[in-house]
Image: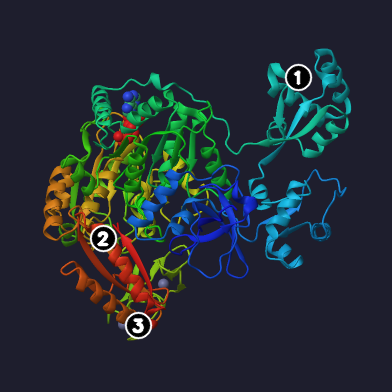
Amino acid sequence: MEETLFAEILLPLHIPGCLTYRVPVVLAGQMGVGKRVVVPLGKKKKYTGIVKRLHTIPPQVPTIKYVEAIVDEKPLVTEKELQLWEWIAEYYLCFQGDVMQAALPSVLKLQSETRITFHPGFDGESIDLSEKELKVMDALLSNEDMTLSDIASLVDQQKVWPLVKGLVDKGVIITNEEITKKFKPKLINTYRLANDYHTEESLHALFDKLAGKAYKQLEAVMTFVRLAGESIAIHRIEQSVLLKESKVKTTVLNALVKKGVFIKEIIEASRFESVLPKKPVSSITLNDCQVNALKAIDSAFLEKKPVLLHGVTGSGKTEIYIRLIQQQIDRRQQTLYLLPEIALTSQIINRLQYYFGDKVMVYHSGFNEMERAEVWQRAAAFTGADNDPFVLLGARSALFLPLRNPGLVIVDEEHDTSFKQNEAPPRYNARDVAIVIAKMFNIPVILGSATPAVESYYNAETGKYALIEINKRFSGVPMPEIMVADLRKERKNKTMQEHFSSLLVKKMKEALNDDEQIILFQNRRGFSLRLFCTQCGWTPECPHCDVSLTYHEYIRKIKCHYCGYSQSVPTRCEVCNSAEVKMAGFGTERIENELPLIFPDAKVNRMDLETTRKKHAYAKIFEAFETRETDILVGTQMVSKGLDFDNVGVVGIMNADNMINFPDFRSFERSFMQITQVSGRAGRKNKRGRVVIQSSNPDHDVIRFAINNDYQAMYKSQLMERKQYRYPPFFRIVLITLKGRDRSNVNKAAEYLAALLKNRLPGLVLGPEYPLVPRIKNQFLKQIMVKLPRDKDSGKKKSFILKASEYTNKQIDYKQVRIILNVDPY
Ligand code: ADP
Ligand code: ZN
Ligand code: ZN
């Protein structure tokens, strides 16, 4: 008698741990950790889960359901990946199901909606089918395709999977149709020249024949011959190319197919076009700084230490990464290359493809589900063959891609806040997880930045990381000259034009005269255009969130940045009925509108969330600037990220004060980074760039440090503050947000939880307090901040926080309150 096998199954749901299922004897032999299985949940639902563990210990529950089918022949997820998911769940206080949900593209997570349909090769000859199988077949004949739940109701039995599997084995149907459908490779029409016309004489005869009466057809054939070049016998040309080049219509091509001149073939095209490298990496000659940095990196790798590469903007860090990637490819190993946002990727993709062709594979949120799944599967199939993905390049979620033979992890712009996922669990920081991945695989990791995060620099200073610094730009051009425009003085002297100081205007004029381009930076966090009543101070606010509405010129409405609510612009104050309602503050759009008044001839473009929402919009704005169609680019953070332009004479920072004064313990550090990063865009190939910072507080430390390009001074002053006020890197923060529709309920739950925490973690708990925006989408918010010393007990303390939150949620009165835990909020 064989023992019953049980499986712990991880489901892509926000539930704790795994669920236990019984494995039917017939499936026992094929079960394996990391494979996907189909399991029932509740009365009707079915999910694809992943086998986490197999054992023979019967669970202590009255009823236990069966695993219904196995989806994979080979495990989809490796044990290492499962380990990583576990680590993420534990560290970031979320569930492994949350991690699975984030890690796998959705087409790999089938649910009861999975479809079946006839096997394309099934000829209708029924071979020995059972009554139930025939019933399914009949239903399929009239339905084309059905979901598993449809079938379940049809044959009146819960366990449809064995039935379905039987039909699959007999070649009658195909399942996982969702997958096949979603994976359906892109099909393209192509044309080949029929065998009869492969000789010169036959071709000329054809030309003569067509020349008389079918001029368009002649055009198409001649275009084909021109495009095919030497190889007319074997060449296939895509329909779209042929149409475009010959300027004929599809009907013309069809006519040629009818005549037997062309043979039309539909072939599968890979979505990943083949890109050939343009130059070998060996063609790069590194300068002395780079050579020394590379040497230092190699020896740090030998020591198994993470490397922090601190190099000023334009110091040539990317070229160093390219060298390191080549070393990996020579060893047939992969590089995981993480970078902040899509905004940054297009230039980097081009640069990497220039050297590595289609060995570079890209993964980010701009892809649709189908593309994501395809990338995922291609990465999983890595064997080390020549066109395999050796460089996995992507934003934070790329770290969930299957790594089959990794040799190196690169985190570019490691200080960037977008590495942290704040919105949904798992609330992970990709930079920090990258370090864990490197440790798990025992491979080197390199973090690069011109302005490292204080936490990272601290790790380097204390010897946890190896620190490698490059202080010179590759071009030898000095760092830009940074000037401050004193807004208080200029306002007093009435030298301001709209939001432009006379200093900034002067520098911009000089630049435009020299045919140089200009970038103007206005940070998104600053207050943008807001209406207010000059009589009583009233400001229109969002009815669903506690924030003021901001004015948007292009829709001529005021709008909420949190929930999207919008309304028309009020002409009178709702409180005192005064007509004196004016604009306060300014955003990117306002600056864009002011420019023509001061620089009537300049061509202006704007890059922010609004203007880049559409697909390819970003690339278009970017290209217009790169090709110098645009003179002035106005933008938010987006313009400060890793862009490498070679004709920017002046960078203007419109308002440094609202960055510096933002109420957050990181605001000084962030302002310094912002100023430094955006300044880094200034400078031409052989001319020093100029930066004008506009501020009402020109003597502020942050501005002084930025002018002197003194990262060390910023770091030291911040470190002192962090220590004094118990912030990272000395303490670890867990931010708890309570959220609900009933304000007093949220407040009470927050008090309750805070009391539990204060009792166990005396002196470490702050709050509850209202956050900056205390109501969003009609949900009231309250926050508690816990500061944990970084000692061995911090793990235990963190899990206490989780338990206390769950306990609070279990109280009848607080069941409706959502409690969100954010470890290392950023
Ligand atoms: P970073 O990533 O540190 O900001 P980049 O790698 O983008 O710097 O280098 C800045 C500029 O210098 C780029 O235009 C790059 O092409 C050029 N550059 C850097 N290193 C080399 C090199 N070894 N040979 C030729 N050009 C280089
Ligand atoms: Zn008023
Ligand atoms: Zn709102």
* Residue kind at label 1, given as amino acid type: Ala
Amino acid found under the numbered disc labelled 3: Asn
In depth, the one of 590 and 19 nearer the eye is 19
Badge 1 is on which residue?
233
Mark 1–mark 3 Cα distance, whole angstroms, equals 77 Å
The residue sitting at the front extreme is: 1
Mark closer to the chain start, 1 or 3:
1
Q: Is mark 2 within 8 Å of ligand 3?
A: no
Q: Nearer the viewer, mark 2 or mark 1?
A: 2
Q: Earlier in the sequence, mark 2 or mark 1?
A: 1
Q: Earlier in the sequence, mark 3 or mark 2?
A: 3
* Residue 710 seen in this snapshot: no
Residue at mark 3: 745
> Quadrant holding ligand 2?
bottom left
Disc 2 marks a residue whose amino acid type is: Lys
Q: Is residue 738 left or right of residue 259?
A: left
**Coloring scheme used:** rainbow
User: Residues at badges 3 and 2 in contact (C-beta under 8 Å)?
Assistant: no
Please say if the residues under marks 1 and 3 sit with CB atoms less than 8 Å apart.
Answer: no
Please tell me how crowded label 3 is: few (under 14), some (14-19), or many (20+) other residues with Cα within 10 Å: some
With 603 as the anchor, is 448 left or right in this view?
left
Q: Residue 585's spot in the image, x, y percent? A: 30, 65
